[in-house]
Image (spheres, rainbow, N blue to C red):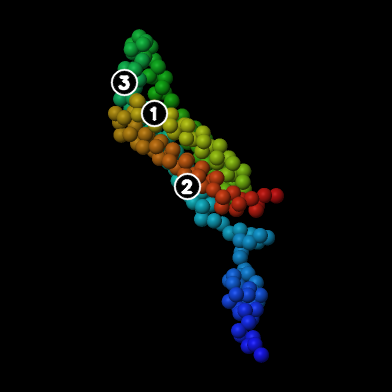
Amino acid sequence: MTNPSENPAYNPASNPGFGGGAPGNKYGTQAYDPNAVGQPMSEPGKYRQLKLVTIITAIVVVASGIFSSLAMGHESFRQNVVNLYSDILTQAEAETIADQMTAGSGVGGLVINTLITVILFALVIAGLYAKKNWGRILGIIFAIIGILAAIAVALFGAGFMLDSVWGILTVVTALAWIVLAIWWLVLAFSRPVKEYLAQFRV
């Protein structure tokens, strides 16, 4: 008579029906997976990074606006503008343009720009913390616009503001803004983030 232990059908290691093969319990069923189909997906690390990068970017953008305003109020900025336009315009016209550009660097303009920036970022942050996909979509739009705006600020600052510390800080924060916006987009388009938000859609 054949010993049952010598029969391959009774070998637990080769027969999943006897608990072998894939990990699970002794009956051969799969272990519980909280992220399996039908189960709520836990918050992925990339989504936490997305929220953190949003907050950091908001701080950098506000700082960039403040530095830019201070740089435009510096005398070296006005003189650089006059020197640029005096080659194609009269001295009086060049000074008028310079005065108009520096007029926007006042406290009133700074407060308005800062307030708008804070409101826009607050909308994105609120949407992300509420686990709403519209927060991600809104953030994508703002990130793309932000990259273009930051490039313009960096080029403008490099051309007119490098004679002052505030101008240098303006360029540095604009470059940081570009890097953060690109990083944000990479996270926002990542699969874990999209799948995590998809489960909250109604």
Residue toward you, 85 or 155: 155
Q: CA distance from mark 1 to mark 2?
A: 24 Å
Q: CA distance from mark 3 to mark 2?
A: 37 Å
Give the x, y percent position of residue 43: 56, 57
Asked if the residue under mark 2 is in contact with the one under mark 3, i.e. CB atoms within 8 Å, the reply is no
Kind of residue sitting beneath label 2: Val
What secondary structure is found at the residue carrying circle 3? helix
Quadrant hosting residue 6: bottom right
Mark 2 or mark 1, which is nearer the start of the sequence? 2
Which of pointers 3 and 1 indicates the residue nearer the eye? 1
Quadrant hosting residue 178: top left
What secondary structure is found at the residue carrying circle 1? helix
Kind of residue sitting beneath label 3: Gln
Q: Which residue is mark 3?
A: 79
Give the x, y percent position of residue 58: 47, 42
Up-down: is 31 above or below 202? below
Q: Residue at x 51, y 36 (%)?
A: 144
Mark 1 or mark 3, which is nearer the start of the sequence? 3
Instruction: Residue lying at the far top in this picture: please name it.
Output: 90
| Left or right of 125 on screen, residue 18 | right
Kind of residue sitting beneath label 1: Leu
Is residue 160 in view from this perspective? yes
Which of pointers 3 and 2 indicates the residue nearer the eye? 2
Q: Residue at x 59, y 72 (%)?
A: 21
- Residue count near mark 1 (Cα–Cα under 10 Å), binned few <14, some 14–19, many ≥20: some
Q: Residue at x 34, y 32 (%)?
A: 167
Q: Which residue is mark 2?
A: 53
Q: Which residue is mark 1?
A: 155
What secondary structure is found at the residue carrying circle 2? helix
Give the x, y percent position of residue 146: 49, 35
Mark 2 or mark 3, which is nearer the start of the sequence? 2
